[in-house]
Structures are given as structure tokens and as C-alpha cells.
Image: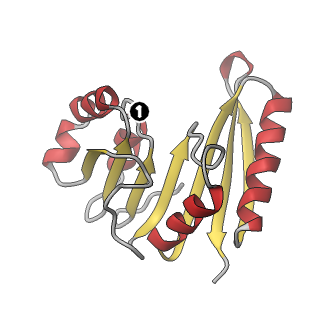
């Protein structure tokens, strides 16, 4: 994601907070807000990232994406890793919300980890079509990791 020191980042579905740690290490004036529905995940992510929270670089909240109180036109980067955000419920509504939260020039990063190349290719194609249908220009990438896992990313930039 090439996080810069001033980025304003939103993570949807932060789980145990691993990505929060990786992003917050690159921030000085910027900040990451991470949300997750599960109280256990928020507790674990908070414990893992206390130093970043205390330094003002991270905030972790228990909230669903649909109901989270988040500022519009604010985030330079929004990302989700292995989150079924677009596949459950109203994808158009979720994508419209993401568009409203992105600052001008901001980007969406949809990461997925799949067990095979075939699953990864299908996931990339479906995510790319979904975002393009809702007014995003996209680029994709994938990389094979240990035990045959394939990490994919679709980057979406709103077409304004």
C-alpha cells in the first residue's frame, strides 16, 4: 500500500491487529482507524497495538462497517484483508459508503488470501468486476506464499 507518514488509513475488519501494527509503524502525522465487529478481536488488536494507540497513530473500535461513525472525504487509504464485506449484503451500498469515506485521490485495497491459484484468480476477477461496475478503476496483483497460499490485492481508485 506504500503507506506514507501522513496517510489517514481505515482498516475494515482488523482481526487481531497485525496489519494495524504494520501500517502504524510508517505513520508520524497520519493515523489508522481500525474497526471490527468482534469484541475479542478488538481487545486483542488493542493489546497488540497499545504503543501505537498511546502515540496517537492508531485507534481501534468495535463497530460494523455499516454503522461505524467515520468522517467523509477523509481516508487516503481504506483496506480490508479476507473480509466478505462485498459478498454479504448490499455491495452497492457498501461500495458507495467507501467512496464517501475516501479523500480525493484516495484508494481502496481489497486483499484476499486463497488456498489455490484457481481460487485466487476467481476472487481477483470477481472483485475487479464488482469495483469497476461501481465506478472504480482497478489494478490487481497476486503473490504465492508458503504452503501454496496466494495473496491477492485489487486496488480501486474512484472515477470521479
On the image, the x and y values in percent for residue 112 come to 64, 38
In the rendered image, which quarter is residue 14 located in? top left
Q: Nearer the viewer, residue 8 or 70?
A: 70
Question: Which residue is depicted at the point 29% across and 31% down?
Answer: 39
Q: Nearer the viewer, residue 34 or 26?
A: 34
Identify the colour scheme used: secondary structure
Taking the view exactly as shown, the residue that stands out farthest to the left is 54
Q: Secondary structure at mark 1?
A: loop
Question: Which residue is depicted at the point 39% across and 73% down?
Answer: 72
Q: Horizontal placement of 71 versus 123: left or right?
A: left
Which quadrant would the C terminus be assigned to in this image?
A: bottom right
Q: Is residue 39 above or below residue 6?
A: above
Taking the view exactly as shown, the residue that stands out farthest to the bottom is 160
Q: Horizontal placement of 7 versus 148: left or right?
A: left
Question: Which residue is depicted at the point 51% across and 57% down?
Answer: 2
Taking the view exactly as shown, the residue that stands out farthest to the right is 118
Q: Is residue 35 above or below residue 138?
A: above
For disc 1, the marked residue is 15
On the image, the x and y values in percent for residue 97 come to 50, 66
On the image, the x and y values in percent for residue 57 come to 24, 53
* Mark 1 nearby-residue class (10 Å; few <14, some 14–19, many ≥20): many
In the rendered image, which quarter is residue 31 located in? bottom left
Amino acid at each position: 500500500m506504500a503507506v506514507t507518514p501522513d496517510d489517514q488509513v481505515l482498516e475494515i475488519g482488523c482481526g487481531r491487529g497485525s496489519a494495524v501494527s504494520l501500517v502504524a509503524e510508517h505513520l508520524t502525522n497520519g493515523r489508522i482507524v481500525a474497526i471490527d465487529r468482534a469484541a475479542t478481536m478488538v481487545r486483542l488488536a488493542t493489546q497488540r497495538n497499545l504503543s501505537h494507540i498511546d502515540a496517537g497513530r492508531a485507534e481501534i473500535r468495535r463497530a460494523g462497517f455499516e454503522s461505524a461513525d467515520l468522517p467523509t472525504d477523509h481516508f487516503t487509504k481504506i483496506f480490508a484483508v479476507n473480509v466478505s464485506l462485498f459478498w454479504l449484503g448490499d455491495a452497492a451500498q457498501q461500495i458507495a459508503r467507501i467512496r464517501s469515506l475516501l479523500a480525493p485521490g484516495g484508494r481502496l485495497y481489497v486483499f484476499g488470501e486463497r488456498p489455490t491459484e484457481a481460487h485466487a484468480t476467481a476472487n481477483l476477477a470477481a472483485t475487479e468486476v464488482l469495483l469497476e461496475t461501481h465506478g472504480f478503476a482497478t489494478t490487481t496483483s497476486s503473490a504465492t506464499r508458503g504452503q501454496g497460499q496466494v495473496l491477492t490485492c485489487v486496488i480501486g481508485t474512484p472515477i470521479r
